[in-house]
Image: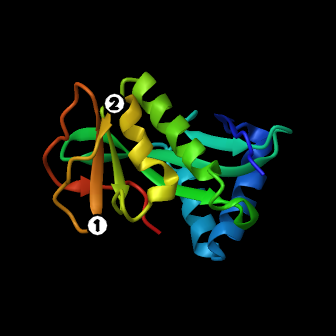
């Protein structure tokens, strides 16, 4: 069965569903707490950068979250978490959410998105497909870390810092 995934920005009525997706996808309360910590942080949380993938009936089944972090003094975005309900995994919902989140970041003139992992570690989330709209995969100096730079942008230099730690 082929599913067409719709994507949209999270609405207030999606918040508990997104928490449930997180809990079911990861099976750990730590991940829900981490998501909640991002929501509560005025530096990390950027309204409009949690993108849900939905069924044609508008049922959220996956999401991708972009939050603010910094490389040196430069503000960049961080991708994570990305979560998909177990029964919808490996069906393209996570990739659809990631691609929509990256397109939103590009449209907002963000230059860089930092990702823990690499394009062969998370292939199903659409990193390879991201190159279709101008995202490149320069290796950033860090363990299992990559930065996606949109066309016309360079990855800044410096230490990577996240405002939220749990």
Q: Is residue 111 left or right of residue 20?
A: left
Residue 143 vs 145, above or below: the answer is below
Of residues 137 and 91, the one nearer the viewer is 91
* Residue 46 in sight from this viewpoint: no
Of residues 126 and 21, the one nearer the viewer is 126
Which tag, 1 or 2, sits closer to the chain's start? 2
Quarter location, residue 84: bottom right
Quarter location, residue 118: bottom left
Please provide percent x and percent y for residue 23: 69, 68
What secondary structure is found at the residue carrying circle 1? Answer: loop
Rounded to the nearest angstrom, the CA distance separating label 1 from label 2 is: 22 Å
Q: Residue at x 75, y 64 (%)?
A: 87
Return the residue at label 1. 144
Q: Residue at x 16, y 59 (%)?
A: 141
Residue 37 vs 97, above or below: the answer is below
Indicate which disc residue 134 carries. 2
Q: Are marks 1 and 2 in contact (CB under 8 Å)?
A: no
Q: How is the image coloured?
A: rainbow
Of residues 61 and 28, the one nearer the viewer is 61
Q: Of circles 1 and 2, which is in front? A: 2
Please provide percent x and percent y for residue 81: 52, 57
What secondary structure is found at the residue carrying circle 2? Answer: loop
Q: Residue at x 18, y 35 (%)?
A: 154
Please provide percent x and percent y for residue 138: 21, 47
């Amino acid at each position: 069965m082929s599913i067409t995934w719709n994507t949209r920005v999270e609405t207030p009525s999606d918040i508990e569903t997104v928490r449930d997706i997180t809990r079911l996808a990861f099976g750990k309360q730590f991940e829900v707490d981490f998501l909640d910590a991002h929501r509560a942080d005025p530096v990390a949380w950027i309204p409009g950068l949690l993108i849900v993938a939905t069924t044609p009936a508008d049922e959220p089944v996956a999401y991708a979250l972009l939050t603010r972090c910094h490389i040196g003094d430069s503000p960049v975005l961080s991708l994570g978490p990305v979560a998909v309900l177990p029964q919808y995994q490996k069906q393209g919902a996570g990739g659809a959410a990631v691609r929509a989140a990256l397109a939103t970041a590009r449209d907002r003139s963000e230059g860089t998105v930092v990702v823990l992992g690499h394009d062969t570690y998370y292939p199903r989330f659409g990193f390879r497909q991201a190159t279709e709209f101008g995202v490149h995969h320069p290796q950033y100096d860090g363990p299992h870390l990559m930065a996606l730079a949109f066309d016309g942008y360079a990855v800044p230099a410096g230490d990577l810092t996240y405002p939220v730690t749990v």
